[in-house]
């Protein structure tokens, strides 16, 4: 199954935005749920494992994000 969100935190305050993003991340981690988010907000992108940047309909960058918990696991 695929879960897609277009600016899922666009009209939320910062506290609720974090709650929604944590819930989406938990779906991904615990249930193996694929989540695709479309956003212009770099803070939302920081919750993601991979970021595809697009310009004029073309992918111009493909980045893998290192999260603090992943870095801690790698160091252990």
Image (tube, rainbow, N blue to C red):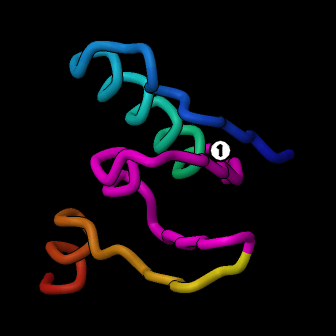
Measuring from the top left, give residue 54's x and y in whole percent: 60, 71
In this rendering, would 7 be left or right of 33? Answer: left
Direction from residue 53 to residue 64 in the image, left or right: left
Q: Which residues are magenta?
A: 31-57
Point out residue 4 in the picture as x, y percentages from the top left corner: 72, 41
Residue 64, horizontal then vertical, whole percent: 43, 80
Q: Residue at x 30, y 28 (%)?
A: 18
- Residue 49 location, quadrant: bottom left
Residue lying at the far front of the rendered structure: 56
The residue that disc 1 covers is 31
- Asked if residue 75 is positioned above or below residue 16 in the image, the reply reads below
In this rendering, would 18 be left or right of 60?
Answer: left
Q: Residue at x 48, y 39 (%)?
A: 26
Within-10-Å neighbours for mark 1: few <14, some 14–19, many 20+ = few
Residue in the picture at 27% in, 14% down: 13
- Residue 29 appears left or right of 6: left
Q: Residue shown at 37%/14% (left/top)?
A: 12
Is residue 23 in the magenta section?
no
């Amino acid at each position: 199954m695929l879960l897609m969100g277009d600016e899922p935190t666009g009209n939320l305050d910062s506290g609720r935005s974090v709650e929604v993003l944590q819930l989406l991340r938990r779906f991904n981690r615990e249930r193996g749920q694929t989540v695709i988010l479309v956003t212009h907000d770099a803070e939302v992108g920081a919750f993601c494992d991979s970021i595809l940047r697009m310009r004029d309909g073309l992918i111009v960058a493909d980045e893998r994000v290192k999260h603090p918990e992943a870095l801690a696991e790698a160091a252990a």
